[in-house]
Amino acid sequence: MSAVPTVIDLFCGIGGLTHGALLAGLNVVAGIDIDPSCQFAFEFNNPSARFIGADVSTLPPEKIAELYPAKGPRVLIGCAPCQPFSKYTERYRKRKSASDLARDKYNKDDNKWRLLYSFANIVERIQPDVVSMENVPGLAKERVFVDFHDTLTRLGYKVSHSVVYCPDYGVPQNRRRLVLLASKFGDIEIIPPLFNTKNYPTVREVIGNLPPLKAGERRQDDALHAAARLSTTNLQRIKNSTPGGTWLDWDDNLRLRCHKKSAGKTYRSIYGRMKWDAPSPTITTQFYGYGNGRFGHPEQDRALSLREGALLQSFPKNYAFVNQNKPFKRREVGRHIGNAVPVELGKAIGVSLLNHISEAN
């Protein structure tokens, strides 16, 4: 291979995918994202890459093309914001009428499809050698994904896609993601799994050695290792929760009113504790709240800290999410961490791209 492939990351956020690609040996020169609050973490932890604050849907593709050097393989990667295709959104859509769905499902001008069509348009305009798109599995069921796939095929790319189980690639989290790879050099696939059920990374391995915390407590040496306060009732609830259990383990007086209704009985993963010796549940943007999922610490009577959520997203321990000299908002940092591509999955994608390009050149 004559040159290390040059990578640009669309919808880069705080740099989970970029950092993984850099760890794999790729040369990421820029990340593009509309959210300026992501700039510090992206640039501080990935100093070789430039953060460009811009809306991908309005940024001229020619400006993106100018970021690549004159020679060498060009790679475009990205994870468009996935809320439109999440399980939560799917539950909402099931409550909509058939006429509502028919009206909005495949409208290219609808904001919830806009970013994927913008991604396809950029690929068509700048024609990178290799493309990677990562997202939630539900996207594969949508017409916008078919259109994206068909655009790549029409442009001469060989395309593969699969739903990967993140623990297979070293992410200590029970998470599945859709990974699409496309190349003008020939057939391309993600590398085979690196882990299996015998050696998946676990919650204990990743956060078991962190200093203990009480609800509402904060470590002086790490501002992100802080636990949200719990009400008296929620403190009683978590004390009555077992790892991997549900609110059915509680006394009746601790249960929420909605849990006593038939519609609420299926939502058993909220207000739960994680298990020590298994991957964690999927880390969402609100993982720091005990009532937002099974985000109770396996042993301590509290929810996850921001640092623990970041580690379960496979960010390195020294990844800086905030400027220590400035105040920060837990909600904003939680959103940054929960929306990020897990670093180890990004690394696996990066290795897949690098191996493919090396073999093709």
Image (cartoon, rainbow, N blue to C red):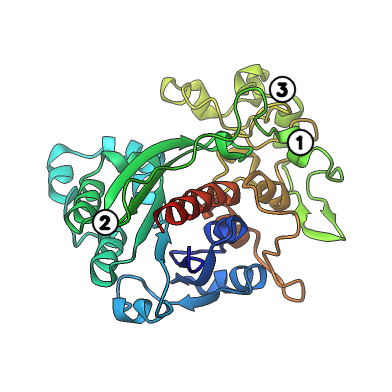
The type of residue carrying mark 3 is Thr
Q: Secondary structure at mark 2?
A: helix
Place of residue 312 in the rendered image (x, y in percent of width and height, measured from the top left): 66, 44
Place of residue 187 in the rendered image (x, y in percent of width and height, measured from the top left): 33, 46
Say whether residue 75 is left or right of residue 37. Answer: left
Q: Secondary structure at mark 1?
A: helix
Name the residue that disc number 1 marks: 205
Name the residue that disc number 3 marks: 242
Spatial separation of the CA atoms under disc 2 and disc 1? 39 Å
The type of residue carrying mark 2 is Trp
Residue 137 seen anywhere in this rendered image of the structure: yes
Category of crowding for the residue at label 1, using alpha-carbon neighbours closer than 10 angstroms: few (below 14), some (14–19), many (at least 20): some
Place of residue 162 in the rendered image (x, y in percent of width and height, measured from the top left): 38, 38
Of 49 and 103, which appears nearest the observer? 49
In the picture, the quarter occupied by the C terminus is bottom left
Q: Residue 61's quadrant in the figure?
A: bottom left
Residue 293 seen anywhere in this rendered image of the structure: no
Of 339 and 120, which appears nearest the observer? 120
